Each structure stands twice: as C-alpha cells, then as structure tokens.
Image (cartoon, rainbow, N blue to C red):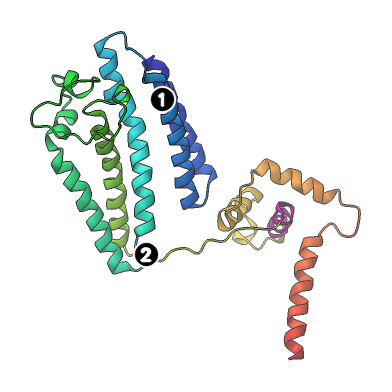
Amino acid sequence: MNEQLRIQLQELEAALAALNMEETDPGRLRQRSLELIGAAIGILHQQVSDYQFPTLEQEVEFFKTIKPQFAALWNYYTRLDLIELKKPATMKPLRRFLQQELLLLQVFFDHHLEFYQYYRSGGTTLDAQLFVRGAALPPGFSSSRIDADSRFSTPGDYVLGRLLANERLRAHLTDLLQQLDSGQNLAQPRRQLHWTGNKINFIELAYALYKSGEINQGKADLAGILEGLRSLFNIKLEVMHAYRYFEDIRMRKMYSRTRFLESLRDQLQRHMEDLDGK
C-alpha cells in the first residue's frame, strides 16, 4: 500500500513540475497547483480512511513519511498564495512584510521546537505516539491537529506537514530578502500582458520577427523567439503547434498570406494619417 502511495506522491510532484513549466501567470500557477494537490489529498483520504495497515510500522511510515509530504505541499502553496496577495507594492514596506512573515514562521518553529528537534534528529522512540491513529500525544509536545477525521489523522502528521512547508517558505522568503539586498525591485509588480487574439496571428508575428533578423543580430532561432513572446504575452503554445499554424498560413489562398501583418501596417498607417489630419 505505502509503495503505491509513494508513487502517487511522485506523480503529484511531477504534475506540479510540469505545471510550473506550462503556466506563466504566477497567480494561476498557485491556484492550479492547489487544485492538483487538493484532488490528490482527496484520493489519499479515500484510500486510507478505512484502511487497516498490516503492521504498526507501516502505519507509522505512512503518517510520518508520506501524508506529511502531501500536507506540506498544500500548506506551502496555500501560505504562498496568501503572502503574494498581501505583499506590499513598495520596497520599504515589502522588506518589513517579509521579515514579519519570517518571524511568524519562527514562532511556529519555536512552539513546536521539541517536535522539530525530534524529527530532524531522526528520532523513532515516540513514533507510536505521534504517528499512529488514536494515540495520545507525548508529554511536552504541542498538537495543531485540524483534520476532524480521526481515521485520517494522528497527533503529529499535521504538525510535521506544517514544519516541512515552513522550511520551504523560510527558504523562499530568505531568498526574496537577499534579492532585495542585491538591489532587485521585487515590490514593483510586472504588468501582465496577455495575448487575446488568435494564435495563428501570434505565429504570423513570431515568424516575421524571426525572418527579419532584428533579434540578437539575426542569431535568435525560431524556438527562442517563440519562447520569449510566449513568456511576454502569457500564451500557452507548444513549438510543434507553431509549425502547424505556419503551415495553415502557407496554405492560405484567398486574399493575403500575411493578412495579420498587413492589418497591423494598415492600422498604424491610419493612425498616423489621423494624427496628420488634426
């Protein structure tokens, strides 16, 4: 059972990695990631809630090494989404905000210090109390259990998931502060541009720029130009699909093959004529 659940975790991590490569909008990336993680945890809940592990060791293994990894992903993306929504738009308040977020993480670490030290030291003597359903929490340990279903929770698995997520968040926030120290303006949000026209027009523009030789002294290849434009305009388009669109452009028989580029030229020409007439 645990081997299959580990495979599911690996598949989730692979899906998140693929989504990170595909989705260019940070907000949508976080929301779509949470959708994937939530669905995976829902399946996990169905599989484990009524399942009786053959041995105590296997139950401990699941609630100590598998479920917390799922929970850590959920907690990380949930908290990251909230941080991005609350993040100030100017430099000085942003630094204070990041420092305060790091302080909140440290408060949680301090509150669960004994638990954290036990886990990081590789301790096992208290596993039967921390990672077995229905067990009583060991003296000196604090619990933050929020899962109401006792069939799917133990005294320690949620806290461990939070601690793992907080480690990742701490690294992320520390990296942002280091970027601020190096002079990068993280507070100035990049205005998002989205291509809302037809994809075939996008390809016509990309090919025209490619053949113009105006980018990187004519050394930029088509794939590089497509990737740059895709990132700039937040458009999902695989290179192989670009070739298919170009073939559609080549097959045009009516009017002009380069109708989009000519439309751009005509609109600019009319704009200048309108200005001349004022």
The local secondary structure at tag 1 comes to helix
Q: Quadrant of the C terminus?
A: bottom right
Q: Identify which residue, 91 or 180, lies in the foreground.
A: 91
Residue drawn where x is 34% and y is 47% of the image: 79
User: In terms of secondary structure, what is the magenta stretch mainly?
Assistant: helix
The local secondary structure at tag 2 comes to loop
Residue drawn where x is 64% and y is 46% of the image: 237
Q: Give the quadrant of residue 193.
A: bottom right
Q: Which residue is mark 1?
A: 44
Q: Give the quadrant of residue 72.
A: top left
- The residue range painted magenta reads 198-210
Q: Identify which residue, 239 or 2, lies in the foreground.
A: 2
CA distance for labels 1 and 2:
38 Å
Q: Quadrant of the N terminus?
A: top left
Q: Residues within 10 Å of mark 1 (few under 14, many from 20)?
A: some
Across and down, in percent, residue 94 comes to: 30, 63
Q: Identify which residue, 267 or 149, lies in the foreground.
A: 149
Marks 1 and 2, the one that precedes in the sequence? 1
Q: Identify which residue, 177 or 34, lies in the foreground.
A: 34
